[in-house]
Image (spheres, grey):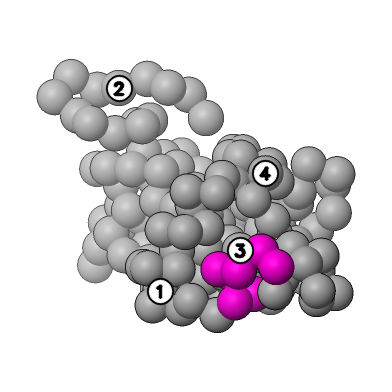
Amino acid sequence: MAATKKPGSYAICPGRKYRDIDIGEEFYDSVTVTEAHLMLSCGLFKDFNPLHSNQVFGGKTQFNGRIMHGPFTAGIMAGLIGNYFTDTIIASLEQKVIFKGAVFPGDTLTTRWRVVKKEDKEKFKGGIVTLEGECTNQEGTVVALGEGKTLVGNG
């Protein structure tokens, strides 16, 4: 993703306009998950299950340690869509995530989305962009698959 900004904008990058989006277009970004992410997620989701909050307990499970909350991974994936369409996104319409593997503090997650369909919506001066995505860890293991629909404008 480009790190350019429009004057007066606090966007991470200028949003892709609906008319400029191509079927097959891909975008991606990576982030390293930290201990702080895990503990903040416990409070944010009000989920202090020992699988997330107790290293001794987590170490005795099939995961051999604490794991991140599923909604955290889904949020990382969704956040990339919001950043990519900054200034042009009108609404997130649907998102489905299938979790395929555990995510641990210290993992580096790479989310990649691909545009698979466009549906013009003149009423909104843009259209619906259908996306398919995947999230992998630093070893290339798929930890989540996603599908989504986002309403994107041209302005």
Label 1 sits on a secondary structure element that is helix
Q: Which residue is mark 2?
A: 5
Magenta run includes residue 91: no
**Residue found at x 64% / y 74%:** 51
Tell us which disc is closer to us: 3 or 2: 3
In the visual, does 61 lie left or right of 71?
right
Vertical arrangement, residue 8 with respect to residue 61, above or below: above
Magenta run includes residue 52: yes
Quarter of the image for the C terminus: give it: top left
Q: Are marks 3 and 2 in contact (CB under 8 Å)?
A: no
Q: Along the line of sight, which residue is nearer the eye, 78 or 25?
A: 78
Vertical arrangement, residue 19 with respect to residue 47, above or below: above
Position of residue 94 measured from the top left corner of the image (x, y, whole percent): 46, 75
Q: Which image quadrant for residue 147?
A: bottom right
Q: Which residue is mark 3?
A: 68
Q: Are marks 4 and 1 in contact (CB under 8 Å)?
A: no
Look at the image and give the residue range highlighted in magenta: 50-56
Q: Which residue is mark 1?
A: 45
Tell us which disc is closer to us: 4 or 2: 4
Res 117 visible? no
Q: Give the Cα distance between marks 1 and 3.
A: 11 Å
Q: Label 4 is placed on what type of residue?
A: Gly
Q: Label 3 is placed on what type of residue?
A: Met
In the visual, does 102 lie left or right of 82?
right
Q: Give the Cα distance between marks 3 and 2.
A: 32 Å
Q: Label 1 is placed on what type of residue?
A: Phe
